[in-house]
Amino acid sequence: MIRGLTLISILTLGLFAMSATQLQTIDRDTLGCIKGIGEKRLNAIITYREKHQVTSLDELLEISGVGKKTIENIRNDVKKKSCQIDKQKQIKESKEDIQKKDIKAE
């Protein structure tokens, strides 16, 4: 029982550490698509991560305007509707481009 709990704890910590690592390297556009992150918060997070090595998403609570809900959205990768629509549009356009190339190849 204790071994199982220890394993779950280690795996959970690994997931959060991985999210912090991803936050450290994620590009500006992708980070800006997360729900609750507007231009002002985006700039604050970018500035923070340039100055600090983010080892836990909870460190972002040190940034003015970033609260638990924003961190939850980052952890769960909750996207803004506008970004989801843009992504769907890009996928549709890519499929149409592939179909056009296939028609030309025939």
Image (cartoon, rainbow, N blue to C red):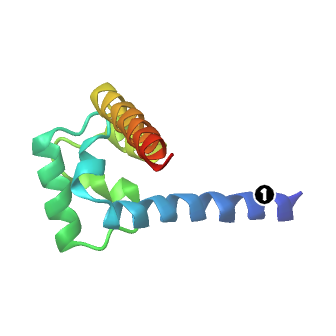
* Quadrant in which the N terminus appears: bottom right
Given residues 62 and 97, the one toward you in this image is 97
Image point 47% across, 50% down: which residue? 105
Residue 42 in picture, x, y percent from top left: 17, 48
Given residues 3 and 11, the one toward you in this image is 11
Image point 49% across, 65% down: which residue? 17
Residue lying furthest front in this view? Answer: 106
Left or right relative to 12: residue 18: left
Residue 39 found in image quarter: top left
Left or right relative to 103: residue 49: left
- Label count reads 1
Residue 69 found in image quarter: top left
Where does label 1 land, which residue?
A: 5
**Is residue 3 depicted above or below 66 in this figure?**
below
Residue lying furthest right in this view? Answer: 1
Amino acid type, residue under disc 1 in the picture: Leu
Residue 61 in picture, x, y percent from top left: 28, 50
- Under circle 1, the secondary element is helix
Image point 78% across, 57% down: which residue? 5
Image point 23% across, 66% down: which residue? 49
Given residues 58 and 18, the one toward you in this image is 18
Left or right relative to 44: residue 86: right
Residue 97 in picture, x, y percent from top left: 38, 42
Task: Count neighbours of disc 1 (C-alpha within 10 A) and say few if under 14, some if 14 to 19, many if 20 or more.
Answer: few
**Is residue 105 depicted above or below 55 in this figure?**
above
